[in-house]
Image: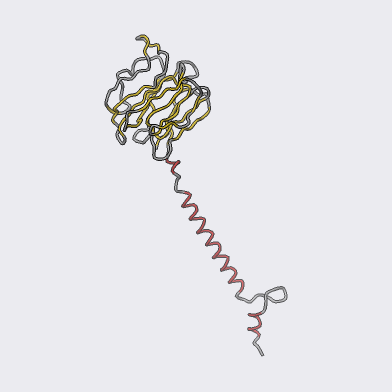
Amino acid sequence: MPLPLARAIHSPAGPDHPCSPGAPLLAAAGRRLALTAILHVTAIAVFLGASLPASAQETFTPAFGGSGGTQFIARCPANTLVTGVEARTGAYVNYIAPLCDGRAIQGGGGGGARRTALCPAGSVVRSMAVTSLRSSNHLLKAVILDCAARGSQVRTASIPLDTPGAFTSPTGTAGNIALLVAGPVGAIRMAENLNKNYPKGTLSCGAKDIIGLQGRSGAAVDALGLICR
């Protein structure tokens, strides 16, 4: 005759067949294991999520110009840097886009006559001198590129974007000109103080590379900034 204990262990659980004394403990242990596994998976996911994507390493400079238009972002393809700009201009800059290792990508703005400004071969843009209109909309009027060899911060060329029309300054009229003065990027140019009546700014990523342009635009370029990495 089987022992009562044996019948208790092998009897199926149910309303008419109570669970064995060890079943609640086994069920609780299983729940603890499942919860521990969930916590481990969650911890791993949080850890992986804390690793910032490449795009999160980018920074945007403040955009120089007016407050109109809508945002545009023109980011160069991976492993390329800004070596110049492509633009369409009238009396001011209607459209602008970066040249990424010499190749244009989509930018922001409207129509006008096509113009380009490109750094010498082997160099990249390290900063930009920008000028806006004096009118209340402060549309982008002029751009001068500061160029330097890749990996260097020493300016080797200043390349103006040719915009038609002339500035009016206390010394008379002057076009959008830049005279080369070798030296640190962002240093004062010989022509810097002409056209004093027009708002001016300098866009720079510091020691970082310029990988694109951003700002606001509509039918013209309202404001311009850089994308840095």
Residue positioned 45% across, 45% down in the render: 52
- Please give left or right for residue 8 compared with residue 118 in the image: right
Query: At 45% across and 17% down in the image, what residue appears?
Result: 133
> From the viewer's perspective, is residue 97 above or below residue 46?
above
- Number of callouts: 0
Location of residue 91 in the rendering, given as x and y in whole percent from the top left corner: 46, 16
Q: Quadrant of the C terminus?
A: top left
**Image location of residue 189, percent across then percent down:** 31, 21
Provide residue 92's location: percent of width, then percent of height. Answer: 45, 18
- Which of 24/193 is in front? 193
Q: In the orientation shown, which residue stands out farthest toward the bottom?
A: 1
Of the pair 65 and 7, the residue shown nearer to us: 65
Quarter of the figure with residue 116: top left
Rendering colour mode: secondary structure
* Residue pictured at 41% horizontal, 31% vertical: 99
Q: Is 150 drawn above or below residue 30 in the view shown?
A: above
In the image, residue 23 above or below residue 2? above
* 182 or 3: nearer the viewer: 182
Percent x, y of residue 150: 31, 35
Quadrant assignment for the N terminus: bottom right
Q: Return the residue found at the far left.
A: 182
